[in-house]
Amino acid sequence: MTEWSSEEGITVEEKVYYYRKAGKIAYEVLHTVKDMIKPGVPVINICEAAEKLIMEKGADGYGFPTNVSINNLAAHFSSPFGDESVIPREGVVKFDIGVHVNGFIADTAITLVLSPELSELQKAAEEGYKAGMEIVQVGTLPSVLGKRIEETITSYGFRPIKELTGHQLGRYELHGEKRLPSVSIPYDPVESTLKEGEAFALETFATTGSGSIHEVSGTKYIYMLLPKRIAIRNPISRKIYSTIYSKYKILPFAERWLTSYDEFNQSRVRFTLRQLLTGGGAVAYPPLADEKGSYVAQHENTFIITEEGEVIVSTQPPFDFEIPESLVGKKSNEDIN
């Protein structure tokens, strides 16, 4: 664990505040930019509008690149540089955004329905999420949660996606140790139960397809550094690597973001990313899809469990929280470590 990712010295009250501030920003951005999602609109315009608004609203950064995943694409599509894809006339669109404040992440997603006959699919994903949240509390077992979600989604005649799960959140950590499945799994140990002070993104996927996803070959638009420094000789590549590390830490980032720097051309960025992947300094997240011709819906919010055991959904109203007294007078979130 690096110094900037440590939660040492940060109280649970402060942590809850950071999650709630990030969640409020995420909610406002999601429900503003979603109105752009209409047939013929370039996907890259949606991604860039969301990311611009995230920063304008006072976030410290992105939790991950904005995802706009269409039809059978379930996750991890964020426009590459020069993307020419547009929103189709029919189908479903998953709109998934991430925000961080002082490293504490809000992760939220909704599904926009372009074809009325797919409304039940969107409802299945949302109701699966709600059914899971109904039993979230201190001591809940992920296996029990998964069974509840699966039963709800299948009651609508669809399948949950077994490989995509909710996930624990940490400071500058999008995918923590614990997972929240959407399907029944073997009984899990007591130590996997939900505990006070923990934060999670609960996400549910409903599909008309197989319920199993695959990586879309030949496409990599999202990357993440690993906590392992590697040696790079080329000075421009070193500068790219340093920029990634300083700006995005070990949170996912988009190749598209790096090509926005005047001194980093597209070929040099891709060369550097290949070096990082080969040297074990980074991982890539290709788009994930169910079988061709299927449709996938998603619903997601972030929650944190307080010291008193209260479950707060940070990415949903009401947003009636105040800054803790211990943080009053601080110049910015990044001053607090």
Image (tube, helix red, strand yellow):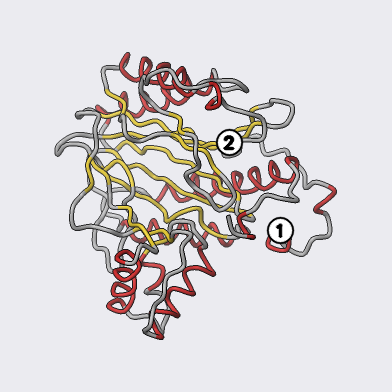
- At x 18%, y 58%, the residue is 218
Q: Which comes before the other along the chain, label 1 or label 2?
A: 2
In three-dimensional space, the C-alpha distance between marks 1 and 2, rounded to whole angstroms, equals: 26 Å
Split into 4 quadrants, where in the image is the N terminus? bottom right
Q: Is residue 224 left or right of residue 317?
A: left
Judging depth in this view, the residue of 23 and 56 nearest the camera is 23
Q: Is residue 190 left or right of residue 7?
A: left
Split into 4 quadrants, where in the image is the C terminus? bottom right
Q: Amino acid at mark 1?
A: Asn
Image coordinates of residue 103 in percent, x first then y, are 60, 54
Check disc 1: other Cα within 10 Å, few if <14, some if 14-19, many if 20+. Answer: some
Query: Residue 31 bears which disc, if any?
Result: none
Which image quadrant is residue 159 in? top left
Q: Which residue is mark 2?
A: 316
- At x 54%, y 37%, the residue is 302
Q: Amino acid at mark 2?
A: Gln
SS state under label 2 = loop
Q: Which residue is mark 1?
A: 337
Image coordinates of residue 232 in percent, x first then y, are 39, 78
